[in-house]
Amino acid sequence: MSAPVALPRWADVVVLPLVNLAMALLVAGAVVAMIGQDPGQVLSLMIRGAFGSARGFSYTLYYTTTFIFTGLAVAVAAHGGLFNIGAEGQATLGGLGAGLVALWLAETLPAAVVLPLMLVASAAFGAAWALVPAYLQAYRGSHIVITTIMFNFIAYTLLVYLLVNVLKAPGSMSVESAPFAEAAFLPTLHEALARIGIEWPSSPLNLSFILALIATAAVYLYLWRTRAGYRLRTVGSSAGVAEYAGIRPAHQMMIAMAISGALAGMVGMNEIAGVNRRLLLDFVAGAGFTGIAVAMMGRNHPAGILVASLLFGALFQGGAEVGFEMPSFSRDMVVTLQGFVILFSGAMAYVLAPALSRLIHGIPGIGKRGTA
Amino acid sequence: MNEHPAPVRAAPPIAVRMDGIHKRFGAVRANDDVTLAIASGTVHALVGENGAGKSTLMSVLYGMYAPNAGSIEVFGKPVQLRSTHDAIAAGIGMVHQHFMLVDTLTALENIMLGAEPHALLRRAERMVRPRLTELMESTGLRVALDARVGDLPVGDRQRLEILKVLFRGAKVLILDEPTAVLTPQETAHLFTVLSRLRDQGTTVILITHKLDEVMRLADRVTVMRGGRVVDERAVADTSAALLAEAMVGRKVNIGRPSGVEVAPGEVVLDARGLKVIDALGVTRLHGVDLALRARQIVGVAGVSGNGQSELLEVLSGLLVPQAGTLLLAGETFAPTRWLTPRTARRLRLAHVPEDRHARAMVLDFAAWESGVLGYEGLPVYSGGGFLRRRRMRGDTDAMMERFDVRPRAPELASGNFSGGNQQKLVLARELGQAPRVLIVGQPTRGVDIGAIEFIHGQLRVMREAGCAILLVSSELDEILTLADRVLVMNAGRITGERAIEACTEAELGMLMAATAHAEPAGAAA
């Protein structure tokens, strides 16, 4: 037993994540150097790739959008004391919901009707997919970590089945649906800006980014300003206290998972309605799991998740750029880099906290300020 | 080594010397230049209100906190205590208020845990058993070594904890509130053992808030207040009243105010035949009958784990009994449709739970969030689904002022208040809704002496205002101080009922202890 870690809030929220990020970059840099590349060049390429041009930045924000949704999904569940590992599957179902509406209605109805319906469907499908494990946890005691993991596989298999057997376009060889009619296209940023006469380089960034920002604000309001959020956080902190207060924990778990699943499902709006514009396999591409790291790094707070999503978005876009510019720097190295950031910022988020605490309390005049 | 046979008046050697200890937590000075010398082979009591710094000081001595300044000597040798391992190596052992035992292991396995002399458990047990038997013989701490800890009564668990510490070679024994969970009889036994250990040369440091125990057992006493030592003297030169005054810094009146008699009113809660069988099939309540009248405090005495917790939970709607009926405010409840906590609040039954942290407040929440817990649905606190945060903050601030909750900081996390202040906040919340029935469990557990006086006063005010109060407490003194009628619970039954005038501590103690060991006492947790 050593002295307990007590970090002032500002250090916990700002300094520690930065230190973790620096550590990740340091270790990643060492690996890059080991394979004979220049870490400085890689880093500068990454930063330039992610933020250096309007096009690169748009790509970064496109990745960010998906991570915001999955990060918020994990965070809402976490505030209810639940570890939702199923954002991947819920996002898959969300895409399916959006896709089904698009295939069914977009030929006949205008975009003003189809797009809201797709949004509702993506959220509803994601929520429904999350509610099954939630029910099993709340009323039957099946552990939600296990069930949500399993539901990821089931979601994937379901999508494969539907695409191969039901939705595949006639005469096509690839496992994907027919392209949607135009009414189901969520406008990309450059399309939207072109309509009001502003030129913007083409990128997958679409209006679901705004949706993500609205969702972030809504999650904040829900958790800290509403009675429902208050009750959810009570349950998440202690089921015993909740019972005493007349709050039914099972009920709140269902609500939390429904919201969590709905948020994850909205990934479908970004990837299916905004970018691919047809239903296909693997469009979530691990974002559900990255969402766990995003939520951890963002301390389950919407503002933190926004920042963490931007970081991971930059990492994905910058990494892709590095792979493009330096052919000897393989795709696997990019994944390795991302892995280090997830490792240090997510899994090992508090490993460096004791050292940082000693450092801060060692400097006279700083340590005192935080706890006041 | 250098232990003395008995407490010798002429300057026995010093076992522990702590010199100029400073320990800060942020801006709070938990220990402010504390100097303490404890003579070898004595019982030294450390008393003070909650937050006086005594637990912090002992945590420093046990290597759990590093002090910001100061030095420690153990048996004349300067030591650096960086961890509990260092402290144990220096011969210091601590028995915590909450037992650190694994319920599913046997007593012997618990003692060995972390100090196994051999990698093969069977061989280790063979090595440990004779040493333990010898230790039990010499100290009088007898425990059934092969019993599962989960099956042992609380008194045995405590002896086991002490045995565990002595087995690791402790020459200095720190006991943190050791009698909080014991019956008067078990306490007496513990004191016999401690006196014997002292006579054999062990140094005992006793952290407590029960001053009569200090007077009965200790040789010297140190009083702490606000992180400083305010008094230190031989027990022979002081009295409980003087110590109380030193602890609080003013005169305190704890005890029954004479003369004020209130005639009890009509029955407002009537429970009959309450029967509870827990998940393991153990019957916790065997058909308990209970009536609460307006303007009356009914005290329930008993050793923890004899059904009091279940009684509190059944009456407050947290637990549905297998059989029984409840009449409250004109509504009748049966197990098929039992009272819920929400209905209870609607019928103006307030509940102050015995375990604050597990029930009464969310430790991560700001005080103003915990300050409306359970009442957040009232129109004053939320409208249209949104919280009325200004109102919540304002009301919490008013509660904190009325109940003198310190620090008066509605934004501070509930978990950062001391136990007494947390309890005052919970009481302020529950009493603030003007309840007709008040169910209170252990209102002063872990609460310091100044706050006890205040809390007792508030409960009396509630009674005079016409409230019917059920008070469950493991502190017999508290029941004798507050109650108008006393029930004794034992093994899930009410085994005695007395008007307060007819109660004697000895008789209640006998009723409490009669068959107290017949059933495992795990339910209190």
Image (tube, coloured by chain):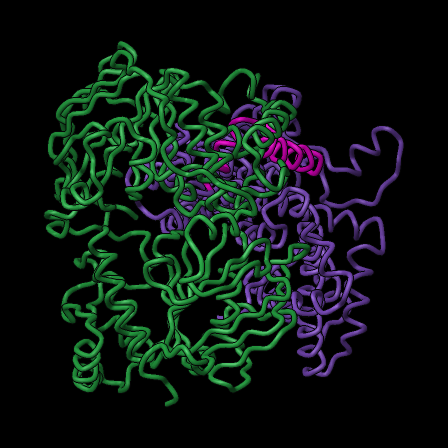
Q: Where is residue A229 in the image (x, y as percent from the top left)?
A: 53, 32
* In this rendering, position of residue A358 left or right of residue A282: right
Name the residue located 59 percent from the left edge and 23 percent from the top edge.
B386
Tell me if residue A119 comes above or below residue A311 in the rendering: above
Q: Is residue B158 visible?
A: yes
Q: Colour of chain A?
A: purple
Q: Quadrant for residue B153, please give it.
A: bottom left
Name the residue located 53 percent from the left edge and 40 percent from the top edge.
A76
Q: Can residue A276 be seen in this view?
A: no
Q: Position of residue B413 (x, y in %)?
A: 58, 43
Foreground residue, A64 or B239?
Answer: B239
User: Magenta includes A219?
Assistant: yes
Query: Is most of the magenta stretch helix, strand or loop?
Result: helix
* In this rendering, position of residue B96 left or right of residue B65: left
Q: Quadrant for residue A178, please give it.
A: top right
* In this rendering, position of residue A47 left or right of residue A149: right
Q: The green chain is which one?
A: B
Q: Dividing the image into 4 quarters, which one contains the N terminus of chain B? A: bottom left
Seen from this angle, which residue lies furthest bottom? Answer: B1
Q: Where is residue A159 in the image (x, y as percent from the top left)?
A: 44, 43
Name the residue located 49 percent from the left edge and 62 percent from the top edge.
B222
User: Magenta includes A45?
Assistant: no
Tell me if residue A351 comes above or below residue A259 in the rendering: below
Tell me if residue A109 comes above or below residue A327 in the rendering: above
Question: Magenta region: which residues?
Answer: A209-236
Tell me if residue A104 comes above or below residue A238 in the rendering: above
Q: Where is residue B112 in the image (x, y as percent from the top left)?
A: 27, 77
Q: Quadrant for residue B277, please give it.
A: top left
Foreground residue, B389 or A199?
Answer: B389
